[in-house]
Amino acid sequence: PFLDVPVKRAIDQPGSVVDQALEKDTTSSKSTPTHKNLESALGKETKSEEELTGSGKFARAFYTHIMSGVSYMIPFVVVGGIFIAISFMFGIYASDPKSDQYNIWAAFFNEIGGNAAFKLYVPILGGFISWSIADKAGLAPGMIGGMMAVNGGSGFLGGMVAGFLAGYVTRFIVKKTQNVPHSYKGIMAVLVIPLIATFIVGLVMFFLLNTPMSNMIRFLTNWLKSMTGVNAFLMGALLAGMMASDMGGPINKTASAFGLAMFASKIYGPSAALMVGGMVPPLGIALATVLFKRKFTIQEREAGKANWVLGASFITEGAIPFAAADPLRVIPANIIGGAVGGAICMASSITLQAPHGGIFVIPIACNKPLLYIGCILIGTIITALILGFTKKNLSEQQMKQQMAAGII
């Protein structure tokens, strides 16, 4: 027996969900639970959730498939970025055999990062978007479409489109060939379905999408390269603020996807601003729990200690429990602190050649590491101060508990 409820209900009404699950365990032992049983057990709330799911089905599916591709792609981007940054430590042109700066170790690190990892991550993105939609049969068409995007100049965005195209084309073919005799199913899965799907994806990418998308990428790249002063300041504020807004949610991931698209085009300023926006919320909250002890409970102060490590590692999700407990104060504080830090970062022409890794990659992947750390600290302090001035003091009973524990 199992119980399927919306996450919101499990958070808001954990007691009733547990009671309902226990009751279902005793009442369902005589029969296998069905979709109708679940609907009747969950009542009106589940029906309204089903209605919401119907209206937002495409958006949810789109988000799920994108995140599947991005999650598999991120390790390639991080590893590639770090190795390229290490190669630059020997000299900007040290990996080029024709340069006077040439160093064999620089060439080695650049080969791993630039010629291997970076050439793989767009095909990985396309392949696993397609895999998320159509399962194993979609992997080859998606990865091949992603590689065509790399070769054709449409990059990250082209790989994303190729992944969705491959996934839905493959799923359509699979659906239409369900009634094939069992003895032919093996050859259909290994040969026929991937072959047809790859042909269609390749046709679309080569003749229709690669040229216009590569032109769009080129325009966007030139625009970002020319961005200075106020425009860079506003762009940095927007990206970092989006990153800090929902801490791993769809707004955060939208900003992150834009940063990765620019990263693929060798524009590294947005990556720096995005990491500021991701590091500031947990660090700002951690600092607030130290500076304003009367505003936080014992449990929150303990969680604040973990946020030092999470924030330094660019794990924004450490701020989620605090935002869930007090969203009207914590979320604006996170956005403002992150936006200020990100704005200063891009206005200062700071770049970061590793889109993840936090404090561990700043010394080797950032062009202005000390100034960059200063941007993060400014955002952290602003978030902490806003929390300190806007959050209410603890109740008298909570204060006594704090004093008894020796915290205040």
Image: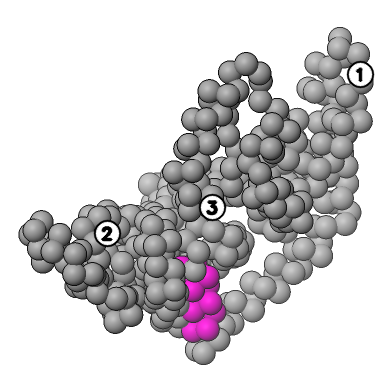
What segment carries the magenta color?
A: 233-244
- Whole-percent x and y of residue 340? 41, 80
Q: Residue at x 42, y 52 (%)?
A: 82
Whole-Å distance between the Cαs marked 2 and 3?
21 Å
Q: Which mark is residue 8?
A: 3
Q: Is residue 285 magenta?
A: no
Identified at 64% across, 72% down, the residue is 221
The local secondary structure at tag 3 comes to: helix
Q: Residue at x 88, y 24 (%)?
A: 178
The structure residue drawn at horizontal position 33% and vertical position 55%, both measured from the top left corner, is: 310
Q: Is residue 204 above or below residue 279?
A: above
What residue is shown with label 2?
300
Nearest to N terminus: mark 1 or mark 2: 1
- State left or right for residue 172 relative to residue 268: right
Quarter of the image with the N terminus in it? top right
Is residue 225 visible to us here? yes
Q: Which element carries disc 1, helix, strand or loop? A: loop
User: The C terminus lies in which quarter of the figure?
Assistant: bottom left
Q: Would residue 69 be visible to someone looking at this image?
A: no
Type of amino acid at the residue the image marks with label 3: Lys
Kindly give the residue lying farthest to the bottom in the view shown. 230
**Three-letter code for the amino acid on which mark 2 is drawn:** Glu
* Residue that mark 1 sits on: 180
